Amino acid sequence: MHLGKALLLAALLLSAVAACSDSEPAADTSGKTLVIVDSDGAFDDIKAILYLLEQPDVEILALTMSGTGIARCPAAAENAAALLERIGAPDIPVACGRTQPLEGDNEALPIWRDSADTLGNVELPAPRALADGDAADLLTEALEDADRNVTLVALGPLTNVAEALEETPDLMDKVDMMYLMGGAVDVGGNVFMIEPNEVAEFNIWADPTAAAIVFDTGVPITLIPLDATNELPVTPYLYEAVAAHRDASPTATFVADYLDVSPLLGGLYHWDELAAIVAIDETVVTIEDRKLAIATGTQSQEGATIDDPNGRPVRVAVAADRAAFESHFYGAIIGTANPGIEAWEPDVVLTWDGATCTYEGPDPLPDQFFIRLDNNSDDLLAFVTGAYDAGTTRAEFDAFLASGEQAQPDWWMAGGQIAAPPGARDVWPMRGGDGLTALCFIDPTRVWEVAGVRLPDQ
C-alpha cells in the first residue's frame, strides 16, 4: 500500500472513532452475558455465585443481597465482598437490602441465620468496601447503566427486586429474563419446620408480598422451583468430589474449606446452583409454560405458587437432568466435569407412593447410615427409628395406632425422625444399631413397619 493511501485510511478510521465517541457508545462486542445476582447469602447462593464467576462468557454487574432471607444484613453483603477478595474476583459492587419483608414477619430459623451470617466460620479476608446505597439502589443503578439488556438471577426472597421495580417500573424493560429460584408448583414446600405450612417454598414464603409484586410487573420469569431442585439432593458426592480437587483453583479451595467445617446436615438440595446453571444453559431442565399466582395472607397457604388460569404466565422448570447439572457445576467449581470418584448411593432408600412404603436396605439398621427418602405422594412423610422393649407384641402396637395417641408409648424408645414433604428426595445421615426398627409414618393411624425387629403376634 502506498504511504498516501495508508495515511488516508488512517484518517478515515480516526474520523469514524471520533464520530462514535461524540454520539452513542460503541456497541459491546464482547459477547458476554450481563448478569445481576440477587441473593440472600446462604451457602447454596455462594456456590451459585462462584459458578457464575467461573463462566468466561458472563460478566456480573452487581451482587445485591437480601436481608429477608437466610443471612442477615449487613453480614450477607460483607461475606460476599470478602469472598470476592479471597478468590481474586473482579471488583463487583455489593450492597445489602432491608432486613424486614415488605409485609409480615416471616423469618428463617435463627440457627440457619446464625450459620449463614458467619459463612460456616470459613476463613475470609477483610471485605471489600460495599457500594453506596442499599441493594434496591444498586440494582436500579446497575440496570440503568447497562449498555444492553441484563439477565437477572434471583436466588433469595424478592424484597430487593420488588422495591426496585416498584420505584422504577421501566427497569423491567432492561431485563431479558429473570431466573428465579423459588416456589413449589406440583410438589410440597419446605417451610413446614418453621410454621404449619406444607405448600410454600422458603424464598417466596419469606416475603410473599414482594413475590406477588414482582409477578404483577410482567417481568419475564423462568421459575426454578422445588419441582426441579428436588431431583438434586446434596449427597456425600459433593464433599468427596471437591476434596479430591481442592487445590484446583481458589474457588475449589474455598468450597473445600467450607465443607470441612460445615457437615452435611441433611435435607439440602442444589437449589440456587441449579438456577444459576439454567440461566446459562436452559437444556439442563425441562421447561413448561404455566399460569401461576402467589398466595398471600393465609398462614397455611402463604407463599404458595398456585396454578391459576387467570395467573401470571411463567416458564417453569419441572425436572432436572442430574448428569448435565453435575457436568456444569463440577466443571466450574473444581475444573473438571469428571471428578474421578465413584458415584454415591445411599445405604437405605425409603419410598412412599401414597399407599405403600417400600424399604431397600439392611435389616437391622447399621450403626451409621445415609438414607434417601423418596416421597412420591401428597403426604408429609416421616421416617422414624426407635426400639421396642423386649416382649412388646404386635397387638400392643396395633392398639396404640388405633387409639390415636400422640404421646410416645412406654414400650417404645425413639431414635430419630426425618420429615420429607411431597415430591422430596431427602438425603440424611442417621444412626442405627442393633434392635432399632425403621417406620414409615404418615399420621397416628397410618404407620407401616418396614425394617428391623419384627414384633410377635401375641
Image (cartoon, rainbow, N blue to C red):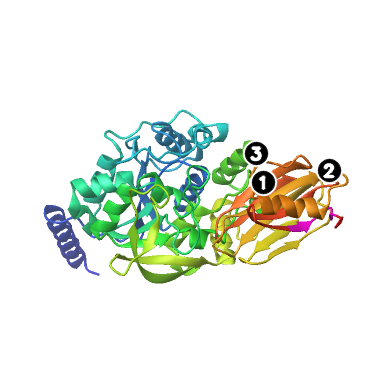
Amino acid beneath label 1: Gln
Q: Position of residue 39 (x, y in %)?
A: 40, 45
- Which structural element holds mark 2? loop
Left or right, 221 with reference to 216: right
Return the residue nearer the eye: 161 or 142: 161
Left or right, 338 with reference to 305: right
Left or right, 1 with reference to 410: left
Residue 432 seen by the camera: no
Residue 85 seen by the camera: yes
- Which structural element holds mark 1? strand
Q: Is residue 391 magenta?
A: no
Q: Name the residue beneath numbered marker 1.
A: 417
Q: Which mark is residue 260?
A: 3
Earlier in the chain: of badge 2 and badge 1, it is 2
Q: Position of residue 83 (x, y in %)?
A: 48, 38
Number of other residues with Cα within 10 Å of mark 1, as a class: few under 14, some 14 to 19, many 20 or more: some
Q: Name the residue beneath numbered marker 2.
A: 389
Magenta region: 449-455
Earlier in the chain: of badge 2 and badge 3, it is 3
Real-space Cα distance between discs 2 and 3? 39 Å
